[in-house]
Image: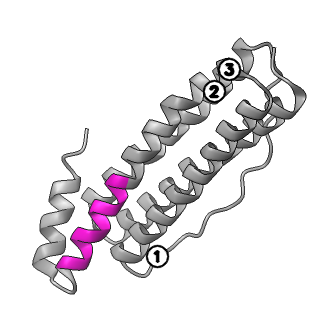
Amino acid sequence: MLSKKMEEALNKQVNAELFSSYLYLAMAADFEAKNLPGIAHWLALQAKEENGHAMKFYGYIADRRGRVTLAAIAAPPAEWATPLAAFEAVLAHEQKVTGLINGLVELAAKEKDNATGVMLQWFVTEQVEEEKSADYIVAQLRMIGESAHGLIMLDRALAQRS
């Protein structure tokens, strides 16, 4: 059974993961409107993945006989000036989520909740992948600079994500 403190923290993480999904969906919508369907596709898949993360936490809370409590999801921004600005925001957001996951790991250790600590290791590994992916795209966009040709090529490459 989860401690009250752990249950509350995991419920906050459900909200954080749902916000991540909402944020990336808002980004996808922005880039659909800007006629960059590959970037929009990548971000929409990222939104779906983040929703999956929320559901992993949801399922885990339920499996441990905890109570899932959903809170309001904050509205994300609606526009980003450039693809680079958007992906810099993605990277910063993923770094923030990494901090949240690390805080949960610390809480699980403090609460001597080994089961939650083990479950969270999947998220620790996942955050390494999330940051690496966002950082790679930021680096690509910085190399491209103002090149429309480069942006079109990256847009096509990001459309290949499955």
Name the quadrant containing residue 108: top right
Q: Which residue is mark 1?
A: 80
Q: Main secondary structure of the magenta part?
A: helix
In magenta, the rendered stretch is: 132-143
Say which label, 1 or 3, has the lower sequence index: 1
Picture coordinates of residue 152, whole percent (x, y):
15, 70
Picture coordinates of residue 78, whole percent (x, y):
55, 70
Q: Residues within 10 Å of mark 3 (few under 14, many from 20)?
A: few
Q: Amino acid at mark 1?
A: Trp
Q: Secondary structure at mark 3?
A: helix
Q: Quadrant of the N terminus?
A: top right
Q: Which residue is mark 3?
A: 114
Front label number (1 vs 2): 2
Q: Can residue 52 be seen in the rendering of this structure?
A: no
| Tags 1 and 2 touching, CB below 8 Å | no
Between 97 and 107, which is closer to the camera in this rendering?
107
Picture coordinates of residue 137, whole percent (x, y):
28, 63
